[in-house]
Amino acid sequence: MNMEIKKEMNAEVQKYLEVAKEKYDKKQYQEALENINKALAIEPENVDALVYRASTYVGMEKYEEGLVDAKKAVEIAPQNANAWLWLGTSFFFNSDFEGASKAYERARELDPQNKDVYISRGVLRQKLSDFEGAYQDYLKAQELDPENKKIYTYLGSVKIFLNKHEEARIDFEKAAVEDTTNSGLWLMSALNNLHTNRIVEAQKDLEFALRLDPDFPLGWYLLGFIKFSRKNYQEAVEDFTKAIATIPKEQITSDIWCARGVCYVHLRNFDKAYHDFNKAIEINPKDGRAYFMRAKVKEYQKDHKGAIIDFQRAKELGYRVN
């Protein structure tokens, strides 16, 4: 939570917000929220408390609630750069990228020396595939705070997309000096290693990331693919299963069901493979690969008529059928 607590505020409010910051930094968001609510019960229009609560709601993934507080903070204090910063972040997590961009720009105008504004705008630009713009924002943040090793994680992440893989590797090594508990750092390092075919190093990075954060679906997903590429099909199944268990239901794509289904084919567990390809088609009826793989399973199960139908459907969807 990036905010100094003003010394002139009500002493009791200040106490609650100091406790809230401590809890927030430990990712104990519910406890942080309880203390912020106590502060707001005393001073309902305390801008610092509203911004604190907006950032806490973002940490709790309650993005709409965060947006409400951030908007109120900006309405009360339109010259408060931190309020605009968190308004931008709240817009970002509500997928309003135009609103986020405008809010970040206003925060930059009000406080051009705030590194967090440039980092946040860089993350937005990277999300929108403006990799060069993101790179320039991260460089500006580093210029403003050259001793902050965490900025190397951002620099390394965008250099992956700029095909500066060796520079990215060095950046991740620098970031790891002070940021060893950041699972996102190790995920980015793994992605960079995968781009340069350093499979063993990528697997080590992912395993470390998952020790830090076992509820990290992308980590399990990528680890599953590495295990698959090394023909460790049973272990790949276990990793894909963990990914499916940790991804919110509404975010699961057909790809992961197909990936696990292919593993089951290699393990000759055709019933489970058939189940997974069905799930993939249920999620995405235009997934040609899923139809193709289900056709292969039907062939193994001697359902030749069903296989022909699925092969034809895969072909219609543009999937190359040999």
Image: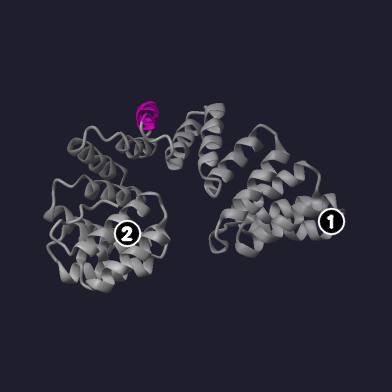
Nearer-the-camera pick, 196 or 181: 181
On the image, the x and y values in percent for residue 267 come to: 78, 42
Amino acid at the residue labelled 2:
Ser
> Is residue 286 in view?
yes
Q: Quadrant of residue 131?
A: top left
Identify the magenta region: 164-177
> Is residue 320 in view?
no
Q: Residues within 10 Å of mark 1 (few under 14, many from 20)?
A: some
On the image, the x and y values in percent for residue 98 come to: 28, 62
Res. 55 mark: 2
Q: Quadrant of residue 13?
A: bottom left
On the image, the x and y values in percent for residue 204 come to: 55, 31
Q: Does residue 256 lie above or below 282 as drawn?
A: above
Q: Residue at x 26, y 62 (%)?
A: 51
Q: Which residue is denoted by mark 1 in the rendering?
A: 304
Q: Residues within 10 Å of mark 2 (few under 14, many from 20)?
A: many
On the image, the x and y values in percent for residue 311 come to: 72, 55
